[in-house]
Each structure stands twice: as C-alpha cells, then as structure tokens.
Amino acid sequence: MRASPLHEAHVAAGAVLTGFAGWRLPLRYASETAEHLAGRSAVGVFDLSHMGEIEVRGPGAADLLDATLVGELGGLRVGRAKYTLLCDDGGGVVDDLVVYRLAADDFLVVANAANVAAVAGALAGAASGRDADVVDATVGTALVAVQGPASAATLAQVLSADRCGVQPARRNDPEPVLGLRRYGCVRADVAGVPAVVGRTGYTGEDGFELYVPAGQARRVWDAVLDAGRAHGAVPAGLAARDTLRLEAGMALFGHELTRETDPFEAGLGRLVALDKPVGFPGRHALAERAARPPARRLVGLLADGRRILRHGQAVAGPSGAGTVTSGAWSPTLQRSIALAYLPPGDAEPGTPVTADVRGAAVTAVVTATPFHRPPTGGTP
C-alpha cells in the first residue's frame, strides 16, 4: 500500500491505520465520535492525500472538460469550483469529481482514489486533437482538509494570497477568508507553502481543502493544527469523515454512485447539461433516462432503536424492495441513519419501511436529506 506524505505524522499521533483504495491512512486517532463532533462544533483536520489530482491546461482545456464530463465547465468562472460527474456510454457513473478553475486555461480535476486511472485515461483520450495537456499530479500532491465552524478562523492565521480572480463574498456566505465564498478557489501560501485553496469539503460544514506539494505537507499539517488549537482543532480520520458526509447526505462512490447508477436516480440530474453544444460520454443514454421517471430513487432513512443500518442490507416499503447503500450511527442526531435506493412509490418523506439487520426487522422512516444542516448552511 502507498503511504501518505503525512504517514509519519499519523504514526507519531498514535493513529489507527487502515487500508483504503491502495493507501494506508488514519481510520481514527483516539475516538472517532470525538473527531466527528469536533468537525461539527470546532475543526477537524483530515489527510485526504489519497484523492487524485489531475491538471488540465491549455487553450483547449475547457472544451476538453465539456467533451468528457456531464457538467458545463466552459462557463465556470475563474476562481470557482464545480461538482460534476464522469459517466460511461451507458450513463453509469464512473466517478464524481470536483473541478477547480484556477485560470482561463488552467483546471484542477479531483478524483476519488480508486478511479484516478479511469478519470485520467478518459481525459487523456479526449485530449487528442485538442490544444490541452492532461497531467496526473497525484503522486506529487498532498491534500489537507480543514472542516468545521472554526475552519475560517483557523486558516485566517496561516493563509496569504493575491485576491486576483476571487469572486466577492455574497451576503449569505460565511466569513470571507481571502475573499473566498463557498466553492471558490485561489492560489495561496499556507504557512509559506504554495497551495491551491478551495472552500469546498465533504462534511456539510464550512471548510477548506488545501492542495500542497507532497514534500511540504508536514509543514502545512503542523501549522494548521497549531493555528487551530485555540479553536478546538483535532486531527480526524476516515471514520469521522464518513459519518460526517453521511449526516450531510453526500453520496460516496462505490455506495450511492456506481457504474450501475445513473445521475437521475441518485438525485444528481441537475448536474447533467444535456444542452451543451458538445457531446460527452453517456449523453444519449442520459437524455433517454431524463425523459422518463427513474426506476428507483436515493432516499434518507431514520431508523428506530439502536441497531445500525449498513451497506447492502435489504429494505422494504409498501411498494417494493430496495437496498441500503450507506448506514451508520449518527453522533450528532444519536440515531441510526442511512441512505438507500427505494422504488419511487416509497421515496416520499414519512413513508415507513423495514430493514433486515442481521435477521432482525428494524423499522425506519424515509426522510429528506441532509440529516443535519449546520446553522450557517455548510458547504453545498
């Protein structure tokens, strides 16, 4: 397994390590519940260096992305980021991605660890005949995520940047750090280390993601934790990240999103720009699916009692059967929560369902997501 650039920091902090997508990463440091609650009430600092970073540059970069991904990236403003998908010809999801536009001809595409080769290959294949370069920068890049209500106050102590290209904060945006509003991005220095900083994240809270050279990641990691100590910052592992994203109702590739899943049944049809002037993989299949109701829908579940719903468990409602895609005990709600695919007739909030949890029938009710919404609104 590949070691994170921050591996020694995790060992020194006593982290429990686990294998994930070919990487050895911290599962937890002491208590995953405490790390989760820090992400909700203070600051959680995560090592996400397993994520893939793919640079797309050149005069044809925007056209290349439009011809590969379901979203319209050519219209993305400099200093902004967008959540989007790569689909296959049948309309199935190959990966979900975040794309940052750093300059007119300079994009950063962030992929899930297990799908870096597939995403880089699709982009490289589409680059033929276009004036654009595709470079997989994963090995040389570390990603540190700073998430939680005090993330802005923490990073304000270690960040400096030119504000050029950053869109002004809107009235309902959180505290502007370097002028960044949600889904904004900028090149900056973090503790003197050059970085791409995005006001993005995977927890539902306000937060930032810092893309830094792998060789200088420890300097950034230590500086952020030092700056955040007064705000309650703690290092947090993959376990807390998963429960935070589940409370936020965010999809996870391999669970809610797969090649057997299309964007419309996952509730992500808004991401598909069928009216783009350029074609993209899956466009024909997705146009057909958009024209008819989905055969199933992704929903949230609130379970009764203390039994925990888990990925792969069967769930049944009045109209038919479905499957749990993700489930966990929610430290914030003190309830068992889950995401599941159900027939459309059972997808309305308030619908009672029953899940098979190791042979025991657990009652639950369909609920709207996110399960938890911070007072500030969090990161979309």
Image (spheres, grey):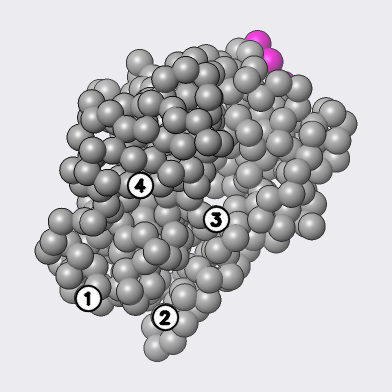
Q: Give the alpha-carbon distance from disc 2 to disc 3, as whole Å.
A: 20 Å
| Mark 2 or 3, closer to the camera | 3
- Residue 112: give its label: 3
Which residue is found at the position 55% from the left and 63% from the top?
Answer: 115
Instruction: Please identify the residue farthest to the left as the structure is shown.
Output: 291
Query: In this figure, which residue is indicated by the disc labeled 2?
Result: 126
In the rendered image, the quadrant that contains the C terminus is top left
Residue 228 drawn in magenta: yes
Please, what is the three-letter code of the amino acid marked with disc 3?
Asn
Q: Give the alpha-carbon distance from disc 2 to disc 1, as whole Å.
A: 17 Å
Query: In this figure, which residue is indicated by the disc labeled 4?
Result: 322
Segment tinted magenta in the rendering: 226-230
Which residue is found at the position 75% from the left and 27% from the top?
Answer: 29
* Badge 4 or badge 3: first in the primary sequence: 3
- Residue 284: give its label: 1
Category of crowding for the residue at label 4, using alpha-carbon neighbours closer than 10 angstroms: few (below 14), some (14–19), many (at least 20): many
Cβ–Cβ under 8 Å for marks 2 and 1: no
In the rendered image, the quadrant that contains the N terminus is bottom right
* Badge 2 or badge 3: first in the primary sequence: 3
Please, what is the three-letter code of the amino acid marked with disc 4?
Gly
* Badge 4 or badge 1: first in the primary sequence: 1
